[in-house]
Image (cartoon, rainbow, N blue to C red):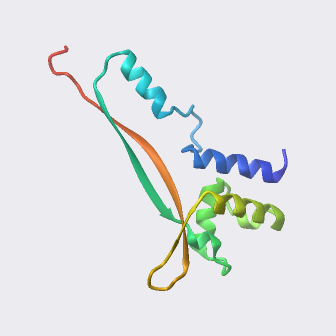
Amino acid sequence: MSDIAKYAKKLLHVTQGGSSIKRPVVTGEEIQTILDKYHIAYTQCEYTESTNITTCFNEDDSYTGNHLLDILTQTSEFKKSVSETVYQSVMDVIKKNTRVSNCIETGEQRFYYDSISDIFIISKNIHDK
């Protein structure tokens, strides 16, 4: 597997709500199917969190930007450990998966990574014992 493919796979895992914990990822649909199958009462909602990752794109080699890249790529000292070609390819993938917004005060572009999670609130029926 090429270096670019390796980091693209890690980024895909991160953008799909994965983590470095070795366990299977369960989707909201799978949880909903199980709850419905066993007639368990629940309320479901989506939670969206936006993280400003603009510092990842700063040319000044910022401390915060480098650490955000380490988290996104799940690689310690990512920028120092890859070639310029791999770095640029990974940055292109990150940029394609972010939301861009212009700051009203400065006019600068800001990049946001949106993470969407399903939240289930399971109700316990006090009459079932």
Q: Position of residue 53 (x, y in %)?
A: 55, 67
Residue most extreme to the left: 127
Q: Position of residue 78 (x, y in %)?
A: 71, 62
Q: Is residue 110 left or right of residue 95?
A: left
Q: Is residue 31 above or below residue 39?
A: below
Residue 16 quadrant = top right
Q: Is residue 38 above or below residue 3?
A: above
Residue plotted at (23% across, 25% down): 124
Residue 20 quadrant = top right
How many numbered tags mark residues here? 0
Q: Quadrant of the N terminus?
A: top right
Residue nearest the observer in this picture, 126 or 80: 126
Residue plotted at (43% across, 28% down): 31
Q: Is residue 44 left or right of residue 73?
A: left
Residue most extreme to the bottom: 106
Q: Quadrant of the C terminus?
A: top left
Residue plotted at (47% across, 30% down): 29
Q: Is residue 63 above or below residue 86?
A: below
Residue 118 quadrant = top left
Q: Position of residue 42 (x, y in %)?
A: 30, 29
Residue nearest the observer in this picture, 64 or 119: 119
